[in-house]
Image: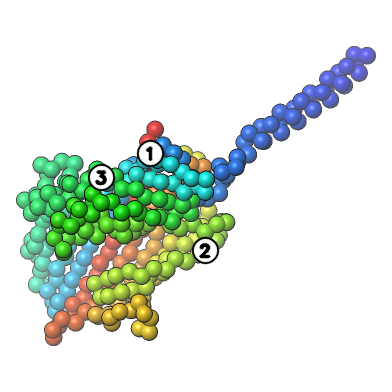
Amino acid sequence: MFQANCTQRRVSFAIFAAAVFSILLALNSPAHGQSNEVCWKLKANDRFIIELNQTSKSNTTVDSRETSVESKTEIEMSWEVSKVDSKGNATIRQTITGINLLVNGFTRKKKGETGSPLLEVVVNTSNPAKTSKQGKQLLKQIQPLLNIPIDVVMSPTGEIDVKDSTEVAKLLNKLPNTQNLRQLFSPAGLKEMMGASSVILPQPLSIGQTWNQQSKTDTAMGAMEQTETYTYLRNRDGEQGQVAEFSVATELKPLDSTSDQQGSSLQGELLSFDGSGTLLLDIENGYFSSSKLQNTISTEKPYREKMIKTTVSNEIEMNMRRQK
């Protein structure tokens, strides 16, 4: 009798354990809309801080005379997700909260010389007292553009649509026509800035998959065709859990002269271009936590009876963190 009761208890316990195990599996399985797909998974009231840092080095040679310019740009943005529709499209209030700029340049008559200072510009919106004399006019133009919210809609795959802001448009119209701030704060400029450290993700997506994105980009020489090749390398452990790691290789070439997009012929020759980078996406929380991209371009352009050779190297680093 005792043995029979023990056997029955073991069977009952086994059934109970199987039931508990099934419940745990159900609880741990991805719910509808909360899958482990590699994509953006923003939720209403999500808040993020994004830091974009770009360093650039430019060397221009005319005959034996060389001009070098180094710059560092720091941009801080805040994101607040106001709503997410049934398809996962998130409406984001994006605000640029700070811009710091440092530019140094010098010239030298020939290689090996120390060189003479050409310019030094410092702009610091977080601490205006650090702004140099040459940067005060630029600081004055930047400050009214800060802390103005702009609505952005982003799909789960990373496609971006920046909404026009009447307030920003009015401020931009007051800037000189040659001012680069017009481009930076325009819908196209903001879209390019956001997309520079992200990627449009195909769905479904699996490790080892490779895909291309093509776009037209304007350079000092004219319109060029840019092809970015992305590869989903692996999943690995990160600080907050598993992250998806992507690589990107970039190619640049002149547009086909027969293309309607060509417009005008290139003013010069593209000598070389090299671009690469890595991007990390937090799989569980569904956002790109960091990326690092770099490229170097060398060009040669005729100027009167001389040739101007320019080499520009850029590095862009993005870090995105959720606010608690």
Query: Relative to the observer, which residue lies in front, 85 or 290?
Result: 85
Describe residue 298's horizontal placement relative to residue 231 as left or right.
left
User: In this figure, which residue is indicated by the disc labeled 3?
Assistant: 148
What crowding class fits label 2: few (fewer than 14 Cα within 10 Å), some (14-19), or many (20 or more)? some
The residue type indicated by label 3 comes to Ile
Which callout, 3 or 1, points at the residue further toward the start of the chain? 1
User: In this figure, which residue is indicated by the disc labeled 2?
Assistant: 210
The residue type indicated by label 1 comes to Arg
Give the percent coordinates (x, y) of residue 37: 55, 49
Query: Relative to the observer, which residue lies in front, 311 or 290?
Result: 290
Describe residue 101's horizontal placement relative to residue 278 as left or right.
left
Q: Nearer the viewer, mark 2 or mark 3?
A: 3
Give the percent coordinates (x, y) of residue 84: 46, 43
- Asked which quadrant contains residue 271, the reply is bottom left
Q: Residue at x 6, y 51 (%)?
A: 133
Which callout, 1 or 2, points at the residue further toward the start of the chain? 1
Q: Secondary structure at mark 2?
A: strand
Query: Relative to the observer, which residue lies in front, 305 or 259?
Result: 259
Which callout, 2 or 3, points at the residue further toward the start of the chain? 3
Query: Relative to the observer, which residue lies in front, 98 or 245?
Result: 98
Give the percent coordinates (x, y) of residue 25: 67, 36
Q: Residue at x 48, y 45 (%)?
A: 85
* Residue 47: image tag: 1
Q: Secondary structure at mark 1?
A: strand
The span from disc 2 to disc 3 (Cα, nearest Å) is 38 Å
Q: Nearer the viewer, mark 3 or mark 1?
A: 3
Describe residue 169's horizontal placement relative to residue 138 as left or right.
right
For the N terminus, the quadrant is top right
